[in-house]
Image (cartoon, rainbow, N blue to C red):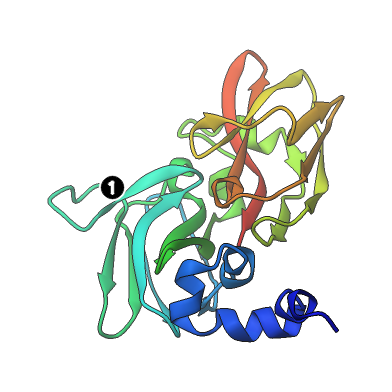
Amino acid sequence: MALTSIIHSENFLAALCNVIEFSRVLPECKPLFFFSDVTLEKQKKTAKEGEAVEETITFTGEKKTEVSEVRVNGQVVEKKGDKADVPSYEVDEEKKTIKISVPKLSAQYAGHYQVKFKVEEAEVTKTILEVEMEAGAAGQDGGGAATPSADVKLDISAKTCKVDEKCEVGETSFTCEDCKLSGVKCNGADAAADKVKVEDKKITYTFEKFADTDACVYMGQFEVGGKEHSQPVAVVEI
């Protein structure tokens, strides 16, 4: 076998890239070296509207791992500070834990909490917590009337993708009366039209070459009975 064939063989290259000195200088190492080096167990909590929610999640990583940001349904969650009425997070680097605190649960803060980890030069997005409001609270507003979320029925798609590889996420079909989907957002920005497509009452996701920025909670922007309503339609991570 020619030397170049040996060097570019999958087993040889994978072994070579595990040596940190080579991983920094060989461009071939990037797709192999960019794997999820973070492990954790996602937690799920259910609470009533207005109740406090608090959860601590432990993560592990063989390489240097830092928490760069936390989001809920694409909204940035602030680090623990002086704002006592909004969700926050705390990181214990020594114990490798992330503590999520929601002082007062509302529809805005119920959903999927994702963390973006920085693993050396790579970024890895993981879903760490799902918070649900009890059905009686989630479907009613303060006056007892049904909210738009009660009118849009769908099953949230979920997928773990690999960077630089093709990734197809299961489609999201939704049903509702007197509603339309005006768009889909990822971390507050419009999702790329060539990756996320809407047809009738169906959303499809196709990533020909998945990027770390494609990992997020995809939020459907609905108009229900003349009211604007945002709701998770897919959870994609690395």
On screen, residue 46 above or below 17: above
The quadrant of the image that shows the C terminus is bottom right
Q: In this view, does 130 lie to the left or right of 164?
A: left
Residue 196 drawn at (x, y percent) = 73, 35
Label 1 SS: loop
Q: Can residue 146 be seen in this snapshot?
A: no
Q: Which residue lies furthest to the top in this view?
A: 226
On screen, 194 above or below 170? above
Residue 223 is situated, as x and y percent measured from the top left of the image, at 65, 20
Question: Going 45% across and 80% down the picture, which residue do you hit?
Answer: 20
Q: Nearer the viewer, residue 109 or 169?
A: 169
In the foreground, 153 or 191: 191
Q: Quadrant of residue 206?
A: top right
- Residue 19 seen in render: yes
Instruction: Assign the N terminus to one quadrant of the image.
Output: bottom right
Residue 3: where, in percent of width, then height? 75, 80
Q: What residue type is labelled 1?
A: Val
Q: Is residue 178 left or right of residue 237?
A: right
In this rendered view, identify the residue nearer to me: 166 or 185: 166
Q: Residue drawn 29% across and 85% down?
A: 95
For the point 67% across and 16% down, the residue is 225
Residue position for label 1: 86
